[in-house]
Image: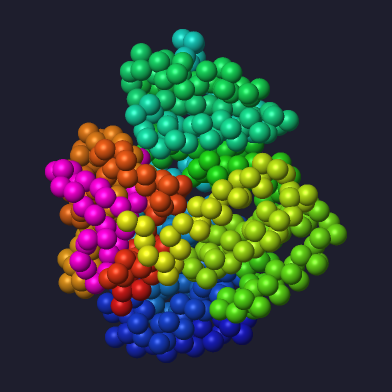
């Protein structure tokens, strides 16, 4: 409460001139203090929608100044909207509906409100904890199948198409993950989003033969006339798109990729969501006291956790699994490096305490994480532009370069690329060259994508297929964004455009 009272004093004391620009830059010291207080309060709140929504309302209503309300509301919205933590979108939509789309607070332009309305419309029906919207579709056998009739202990809804390069890459990994969980009944409702029945059946025969699916039940379906309205109800603006349901048809996972699906299934089967939320909060608070510039401080922190948990195998595994994920997906390069050491010392070097498959997966994850670390010279790449012009990364002469790996089927990639394109002149004036690298192989679809989005930044791809970008860079998930110095030394990685702007100030 003391922290909230301090925040109230600051908020009501700020002159209007400090926030009249409303650019979320927060250069002023007082605004930085407010940002810090808000982040601390949110980070210490149990990460479930009811708690986050209640504390957000409280923070917004603390100030009688309408400009400050606007500032705080938008700051909170963007924190939830950009959060990598699954479930935070519930609070982003709550704020959008209550404060922005209702007209209660005018924090966005008309065009931004239109985009915001689409975001809400395409996400509001499939938030965590909701019942999955009903679907009835044509099956590959020619009959009609309802989602509600095929629910297993867990049900995976998988939206895909046969020309999606990410789908082709993820499908074998997804089948492998499910085969490794044979003791749990999992149904797969695989929704083909294109219209050609012949292509659909050919794809099933080629990529989903029965002997590759394990003991789980797969249902291949499609809705070429869109009578189920699945695109809007499930927000299918790109593929692949995965949702996980429990036995009752309640959504327990959304926006998943293969790795996060595996982590979530293991968490659900071996624990519960509330336990995970408590662990996340404990880890966040525990790491606040760690000096990541000091190897001894890091070792001491990990060792203390190990000593406290090693006597209870399940507690140890739950704690160190969450710790690894927390560090690995942090935007802080020092914490990312710490995740590698932690994983080596307490997972790879203690295989007797872990499932062998998890240890092997972690070893691979470590190998990828060690590629192109911050402070190292970025691995050189030779690629082609859409006009066929050759580009060699090491030959680009620029004060700094931004390397953006993307896929056209990734909606987050599309949003990030739009931001980079809109700010292209800003980057060029700062002597920064944005370079977007397509990770797929569908040239025709890439050309259409660039034209549709009207992108101004340089787009490159591996036209000959010999650049081996997957071996040289960790692009197991996209967008993957790197900031390079003049000599192509990596200054930051796994960031978004907002973090990038702060680094370029």
- Left/right of residue 338 with respect to residue 81 in the rendered view: right
Residue located at (60% from left, 79% from top)? 294
Task: Let me know if residue 115 appears in the view.
Answer: no
- Pinpoint residue 88: horizontal percent, then vertical percent: 52, 56
As for residue 64 lying within the magenta part, the answer is no
Q: Quadrant of residue 288?
A: bottom right
The spot of residue 203 in percent (x, y) is: 41, 20
Residue that lies at the very extreme toward the right in this rendered image: 311
Please give the name of the residue rendered at 46% of the width and 81% of the height, measured from the top-left corner. 34
* 439 relative to 429, above or below: above
Quarter the N terminus occupies: bottom right
Q: Identify the residue shown where x is 62% and y is 64%.
A: 341
- The residue positioned 58% from the left and 23% from the top of the image is 213
- Residue 199, image x, y percentages: 36, 17
| Residue 173 in view, yes or no | yes
Q: Nearer the viewer, residue 479 or 473?
A: 473
Disc tally is 0
Residue sitting nearer the eye, 422 or 144:
422
Q: Position of residue 263 (x, y in %)?
A: 62, 46
Residue 357 quadrant: top right
Seen from the viewer's position, the closer of residues 495 and 239 is 495
Give the residues in magenta.
Answer: 381-409
Is the C terminus in the top left, top right, bottom left or bottom right quadrant? bottom left
461 sits to left or right of 159: left
Residue 396 highlighted magenta (yes or no)? yes
Q: Which of the pair 52/174 is nearer the observer?
A: 174
Q: Would you say 46 lies left or right of 108 here? A: right
């Amino acid at each position: 409460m003391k922290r909230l009272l301090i925040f109230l004093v600051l908020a009501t004391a700020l002159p209007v001139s400090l926030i009249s620009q409303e650019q979320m830059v927060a250069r002023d010291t007082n605004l930085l203090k407010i940002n810090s207080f808000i982040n601390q309060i949110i980070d210490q709140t149990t990460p479930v929608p009811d708690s986050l929504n209640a504390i957000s309302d409280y923070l917004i209503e603390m100030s009688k100044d309408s400009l400050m309300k606007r500032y705080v509301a938008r700051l909170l919205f963007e924190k939830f909207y950009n959060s990598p933590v699954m479930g935070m979108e519930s609070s982003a939509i709550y704020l959008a509906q209550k404060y922005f789309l209702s007209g209660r607070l005018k924090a966005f332009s008309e065009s931004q409100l239109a985009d915001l309305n689409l975001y809400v419309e395409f996400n509001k029906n499939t938030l965590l904890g909701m019942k999955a919207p009903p679907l009835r579709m044509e099956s590959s056998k020619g009959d009609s199948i309802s989602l509600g009739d095929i629910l297993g202990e867990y049900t995976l809804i998988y939206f895909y198409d046969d020309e999606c390069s990410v789908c082709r890459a993820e499908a074998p990994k997804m089948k492998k993950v499910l085969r490794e969980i044979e003791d749990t009944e999992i149904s797969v409702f695989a929704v083909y989003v294109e219209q050609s029945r012949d292509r659909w059946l050919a794809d099933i025969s080629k990529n989903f033969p029965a002997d590759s699916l394990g003991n789980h039940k797969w249902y291949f379906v499609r809705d070429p006339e869109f009578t189920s309205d699945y695109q809007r109800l499930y927000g299918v603006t790109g593929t692949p798109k995965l949702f996980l349901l429990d036995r009752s048809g309640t959504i327990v996972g959304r926006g998943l990729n293969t790795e996060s699906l595996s982590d979530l299934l293991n968490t659900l089967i071996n624990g519960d969501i509330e336990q995970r939320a408590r662990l996340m909060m404990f880890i966040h608070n525990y790491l606040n006291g760690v000096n990541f510039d000091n190897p001894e401080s890091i070792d001491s922190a990990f060792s203390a956790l190990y000593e406290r948990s090693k006597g209870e195998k399940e507690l140890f595994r739950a704690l160190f699994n969450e710790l690894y994920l927390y560090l690995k997906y942090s935007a802080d390069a020092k914490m990312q490096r710490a995740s590698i050491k932690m994983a080596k010392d307490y997972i790879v070097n203690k295989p007797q305490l872990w499932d062998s498959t998890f240890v092997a997966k972690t070893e691979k994850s470590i190998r990828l994480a060690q590629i192109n670390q911050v402070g190292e010279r970025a691995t050189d790449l030779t690629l082609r532009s859409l006009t066929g012009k050759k580009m060699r990364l090491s030959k680009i002469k620029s004060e700094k370069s931004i390397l953006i790996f993307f896929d056209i089927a990734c909606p987050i990639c599309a949003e990030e690329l739009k931001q980079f394109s809109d700010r292209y002149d800003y980057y060029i004036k700062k002597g920064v060259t944005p370079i977007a690298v397509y990770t797929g192989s569908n040239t025709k679809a890439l050309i259409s994508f660039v034209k549709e989005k009207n992108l101004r930044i340089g787009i490159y791809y591996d036209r000959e297929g010999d650049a081996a970008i997957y071996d040289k860079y960790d692009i197991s998930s996209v967008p993957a964004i790197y900031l390079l110095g003049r000599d192509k030394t990596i200054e930051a990685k796994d960031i978004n455009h907002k973090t990038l702007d702060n680094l370029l100030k």
